[in-house]
Amino acid sequence: MSTESLKNNLTIVIPCKNETRTLYDCIYNLSLQSGIEGTRIILADASDKGEPLMWLKRVVTDFEHTLQIEVIRGGFPSEGRLNGSKLVTTPFLLFLDADVFLTNPCLLKKCLEHNTGLLTVPFYTDRPYRWVFRVFDLFQRLSQLLGTPFAVGGFQLWKTETYWGVGGYNPKELFAEDYSVSQKVDPQEFKIYHIKGTYTSARRFKQKGVIWMFRIMIKSYLQRNNPEFFTHHHNYWN
């Protein structure tokens, strides 16, 4: 598959709510990706405040000559991702979070070259939390060996056919919806591609604490066959 131009192969869906400069920086980094010109970016937005809406408008205006950006109705991440995915017509679909910055300009092209059902990448973040993601890498690898792949919703690159084959996102899920959908993928179609250049904020670690995050991740695994578990927010959004 040729990835010289991404627009014919890839659509990017970003759920967001009340984001300001973070969303702008996310899109700015996307605009620097090799071959990105004309690629469709769907922002599933649920903003209800004035300043975020101003930033949203600025994103569309400032990058309209590089990217094909459209704004649709969002909600909780699962609903926003589902709404965006329904509009995708390209062979591949990337779910990206608004606080994820792709700092390696060749990252998307390199990822698409693997042509797999679901691909994710390692993240890095601010000190002193960088070690947390290295521990998470071990959990992620273990999930693959156990037959329940875990791809963080902040970066899920799907073959569109594979995504719909597992049913897509469930809009009723309010928590760990990324694990809920990724665990349904055949482990043979799942790849963790070890490439550098995917940054995300440490804000969740700061807000919830590292121990809470690891405990709830383990609990999600233990409850993986209980659909009702994922329909409660477990104070994650508080």
Image: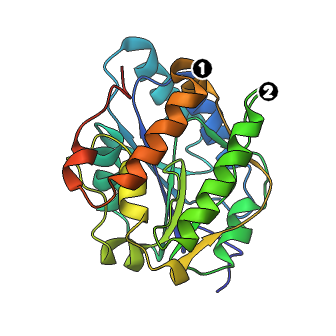
Q: Is residue 133 above or below residue 114?
A: above
x and y percentages locating residue 139 in the rendered image: 61, 55
Estimate the spatial distance between the alpha carbons at disc 1 and disc 2, rounded to whole Å: 11 Å
x and y percentages locating residue 16 in the rendered image: 42, 35
Residue shown at 32% from the left, 73% from the top: 166
Q: Is residue 103 above or below residue 99?
A: below
- Residue 100 location, quadrant: top right
Residue 102 in view (yes/no): no
Q: Residues within 10 Å of mark 2 (few under 14, many from 20)?
A: few
Q: Is residue 75 above or below residue 14?
A: above
x and y percentages locating residue 128 in the rendered image: 78, 25
Q: How is the image coloured?
A: rainbow
- Residue 101 location, quadrant: top right
User: Hey, what amino acid is under mark 2?
Assistant: Arg
Residue shown at 74% from the left, 47% from the top: 134
Local SS, label 1: helix
Residue shown at 31% from the left, 31% from the top: 234
State the residue position of label 2: 127
Q: Are marks 1 and 2 in contact (CB under 8 Å)?
A: no
Residue 6 in view (yes/no): yes
x and y percentages locating residue 23 in the rendered image: 55, 32
Q: Tell me the number on the disc at residue 206.
A: 1
10, 164: nearer the viewer: 164
Q: Residue lying furthest top in this view?
A: 50
User: Hey, what amino acid is under mark 1?
Assistant: Lys
Q: Is residue 164 above or below residue 27?
A: below
Residue shown at 24% from the left, 37% from the top: 232
